[in-house]
Structures are given as C-alpha cells and as structure tokens.
Image (tube, helix red, strand yellow):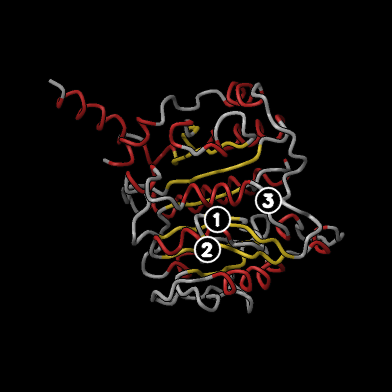
C-alpha cells in the first residue's frame, strides 16, 4: 500500500502536540515578521516551479476593517515555497501515488494568488481552489492571467451552498475550479455536488491558514468533514491532508496541533523529503495527516503483511 509505505518513511508519528510545538520553536527561526511577500505592492512578479507568475494583490483590502477575513488579499512567503515543492515530480506525494495524473485536490484558504493550483493543476486531474467570496474575483483573474494549460476537463456541478456568481472555472484553466468556502459560515453538505461523480477528494491542502486561534476549530472541523466524505464510503486510500505553515506563535501552533491530533494521525515531513527553503530552521513546517478512523485496522494489517513477508 503506497500510503502506508510513505507513512513508514516519514518516521515517528506525532504523539504529543506539546512536544512537537516545543521541538519546532526550539529551532533558530529567522525573523520574517508576519510573512507577507510585500504587503504594499499591487503586483508581484516571481518564478515558481520554473514558471514566471505575476500576482495581482489587494493591499487596500488587507488594511481595511471589513468583517470578512483580509489576510488572503496578499501573497504570503510560504505559498511559493510550498507550491514549488508540492508540484515537483520527485515529490514523495507523487512517487508514492498520493498524487497522480487523475487526482482531485482541494485547497482551503488559497487567497487571491492561487499559486499552488497554478503549478500543481497541470500535473493532476482536477484542482478546486476555495476561499471567502470577496477574494474570488481577484483569484480568478490571477489564475486566468497565469494559466498555460489547454487541457480538457469535465465541468463541475455547482452547489448553491458552496458557490456563488464568482465561483466557476477561470478562463484558460479548465481543470481549476474556484469555489466560495468560508470555514466559519459555509456548509460542506453540498460538496459532493461540486466534486461531481468523484464525490471525494484525494488530497486536501491548507497552506498558511493557521495564524489566529479563533479559526483553528473551524479549520480543523472543515478538514475533518471533507476527509470523512471518503471514509464514510470505506474507500482506500483515504484523503490525505497536507498542512503547511509559517512558525509564528507557539501558542497558536500548539492549539492547532492539539485540535488536529483529536481527529487526525499526523507526521512532520522530514528534511530529506523537502527542499532547502522548507527544512529545519527555515521558519516553515509541513505536516501530513490522515483521519484516525481511516487508518484503524489498515496499519495493523499492513504490519502483519510486512512481518510475514520478512519471514
């Protein structure tokens, strides 16, 4: 089983969220402030995974007092680093068939840039980028302006609860779907309609979504509910949840780790699986999680198979 083989290679499972927080924040962390690339620029040019990308930002939204979240209006430093890593063909997610040419990936809180989807979507079957509705117009524009793939993709069904007039497929990116999803307000009950006949997600991504304790429980609950769509049907392999984040506050990180631990078994990706910009002392970390109920019995049976094959 490729997933269980990957989990074995990841090393020790996180058993103590407090210890994980202590170990991570004992590193020599660089000073990166909040982690914006440039909070004042209206446009940013950068190269990710060998592609030149121009990101249009909304600094005025970031500095506004609107009730909706504003942090997604600008680009954060970890996003291009994570996008470059996750889209590489030698990535362990590809080499262990977690990601394949027909995979469906959903990203929570993608922000206005859409960088992860831009570089990962050409390598997979379908990518769903989600965030709050007021960010979707700029997100779709950035995806359309930076898309290169003319590949065909089946149109996705629309859900009244999860989509809006701003949702849909950006021009030039037929396998990227933009969907409004607010963790605190939106129901995922209609997500299977958005997913279409597949009805479940192969991989769920949260990139730098953890910076505020108030959002931790809604974020983890949404991750859990999306991953449960596959577990309820007894499908294998289960949905894999990848969480990348900048190490800012030990209290916020520990609160997330404790909440995540309740529903997920999770592992920190080791340095040998990451490139330099994401390794120890970089100020960033990536964890891989799988629902506890999804792994019940499977790891035990896999362990018995391993023991028998070694005899």
- Residue drawn at x 46%, y 50% as measured from the top left: 227
Instruction: Name the residue tied to disc 1.
Output: 48
- Answer whether residue 153 is visible to the viewer in this image: no
Compared to residue 48, the image places residue 237 above or below, namely above
Name the side, left or right, on which 256 lies relative to 266: right
Q: Position of residue 217 (x, y in %)?
A: 65, 44
Label 3 environment density (alpha carbons within 10 Å; few <14, some 14–19, many ≥20): many
Q: Position of residue 185 (x, y in %)?
A: 67, 60
CA–CA distance in space, label 1 to label 3: 13 Å
Compared to residue 242, the image places residue 45 above or below, namely below
Q: Secondary structure at mark 1?
A: strand
Q: Which mark is residue 76?
A: 3
CA–CA distance in space, label 1 to label 2: 9 Å
The answer to whether mark 1 and mark 2 are in CB contact below 8 A is yes
- Residue drawn at x 76%, y 43% as measured from the top left: 34
Q: Position of residue 242 (x, y in %)?
A: 50, 45
Q: Secondary structure at mark 2?
A: helix
Compared to residue 144, the image places residue 300 above or below, namely above
Instruction: Name the residue tied to disc 2.
Output: 118
């Amino acid at each position: 089983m490729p997933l269980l083989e990957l989990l074995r290679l990841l090393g020790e499972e996180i058993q103590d969220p407090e210890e994980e927080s202590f170990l991570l924040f004992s590193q020599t962390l660089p000073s990166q402030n909040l982690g914006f690339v440039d909070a004042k620029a209206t446009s940013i040019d950068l190269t990710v995974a060998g592609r030149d990308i121009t990101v249009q930002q909304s600094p005025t939204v970031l500095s506004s007092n609107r009730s909706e979240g504003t942090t997604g209006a600008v680009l954060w430093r970890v996003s291009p680093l994570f996008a470059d890593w996750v889209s590489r063909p030698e990535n362990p997610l590809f080499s262990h068939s977690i990601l394949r040419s027909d995979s469906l990936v959903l990203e929570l809180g993608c922000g206005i840039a859409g960088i992860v989807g831009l570089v990962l979507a050409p390598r997979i079957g379908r990518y769903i980028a989600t965030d709050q509705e007021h960010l979707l117009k700029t997100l779709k524009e950035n995806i359309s302006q930076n898309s290169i793939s003319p590949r065909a993709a089946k149109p996705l069904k629309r859900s009244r609860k999860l989509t809006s007039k701003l949702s849909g497929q950006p021009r030039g990116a037929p396998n990227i779907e933009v969907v409004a999803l607010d963790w605190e307000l939106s129901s995922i009950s209609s997500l299977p309609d958005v997913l279409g006949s597949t009805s479940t997600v192969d991989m769920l991504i949260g990139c730098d979504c953890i910076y505020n304790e108030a959002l931790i429980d809604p974020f983890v609950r949404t991750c859990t509910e999306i991953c449960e769509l596959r577990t309820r049907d007894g499908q294998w392999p289960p949905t894999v949840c990848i969480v990348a984040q900048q190490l800012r506050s030990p209290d916020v990180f520990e609160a997330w780790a404790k909440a995540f631990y309740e529903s997920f078994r999770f592992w920190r990706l080791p340095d040998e699986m990451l490139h330099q910009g994401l390794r120890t002392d970089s100020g960033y970390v990536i964890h891989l999680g799988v629902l506890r109920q999804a792994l019940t019995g499977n790891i035990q049976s896999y362990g018995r198979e391993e023991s028998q094959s070694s005899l």
